[in-house]
Image: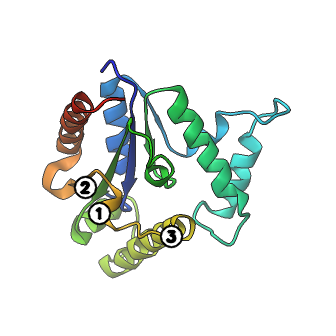
Amino acid sequence: MDKKFVITIARQHYTGGLKIGKLLAEELGVHCYDSEMFTLVSDDNGESKAAHDARIKGAGMYDISGESNIFEYQSQIIRDLAERESCVIVGRCSNYILRDRPDTLSVFIHAPERFRIKRASSVHYMTDAELSQYLKRADDKKAEYYENYTGLSWYDVTQYDLSVDCEKHGIRGCVDYIRKYVEMYFSQIEV
């Protein structure tokens, strides 16, 4: 695609959203960023921000009781990436942070709980009931983090341009569907 664009992906836990984002970025010939984006910039003194990333990860990305400047730090990196290049950004309230940019398309990946439990069971040795609680806690943390910093509901479909069910489409189908939507979307707007 010859226009600069940014695709943001929010996703429920164990929907394959990061994998979808990486495959989509690869097919579109752009970078996909998630937590690694925090190592990409330097502060005013030229020092790497990787130390900050370690601090953030150690605190837990969705621990809203931590330092209040973490969100501003993330937001600035996301805005810098969006200004600099076409890319896919997974998570970190990126749809909200870039909501006023006409070159941005936001996607929410979701799936029914039974599908996500099946995916999670290949990695975690828990009962279905335990996995259900695990998924609920993970999504609740994401929702709480999003709502704390945006004042909006993470689950509100009006916050996204496109919502895709991974169970219905599969990973490959989601990538194809989003790619086609991206091509159509950006061919119709001026950026």
Task: Provide the secondary structure element on which disc 3 rests.
Answer: loop
Q: Residue at x 30, y 61 (%)?
A: 158
Tell us which disc is closer to us: 3 or 2: 3
The answer to whether the residues at label 3 and label 2 have Cβ atoms under 8 Å apart is: no
The answer to whether the residues at label 2 and label 1 have Cβ atoms under 8 Å apart is: yes
Display coloring: rainbow
Amino acid at dot 1: Val
Q: Of the residues under marks 1 and 3, which one precedes in the sequence?
A: 3
Crowd class of label 2 (few under 14; some 14 to 19; many from 20; radius 10 Å) = some
Q: Which residue is mark 3?
A: 151
Task: Provide the secondary structure element on which disc 2 rests.
Answer: strand
Give the left or right position of residue 39, taking residue 127 as reference.
Answer: right
Quadrant containing the N terminus is top left
Q: Which mark is residue 112?
A: none
Tell us which disc is closer to us: 2 or 1: 1
Residue 20 occupies quadrant: top left
Between 62 and 19, the one lying in front of the other is: 62
* Residue located farthest toward the left when viewing the structure as drawn: 168
Q: Which residue is mark 1?
A: 157
Q: Of the residues under marks 3 and 2, which one precedes in the sequence?
A: 3
Amino acid at dot 3: Gly
Between 8 and 79, the one lying in front of the other is: 79
Q: CA distance from mark 1 to mark 3?
A: 15 Å
Give the left or right position of residue 155, taking residue 172 as reference.
Answer: right
Position of residue 82 measured from the top left corner of the image (x, y, whole percent) = 50, 35
Amino acid at dot 2: Ser
Position of residue 3 measured from the top left corner of the image (x, y, whole percent) = 35, 22
Q: Which residue is mark 2?
A: 163
Q: Of the residues under marks 2 and 1, which one precedes in the sequence?
A: 1
Position of residue 94 measured from the top left corner of the image (x, y, whole percent) = 48, 49
Q: Residue at x 39, y 75 (%)?
A: 136
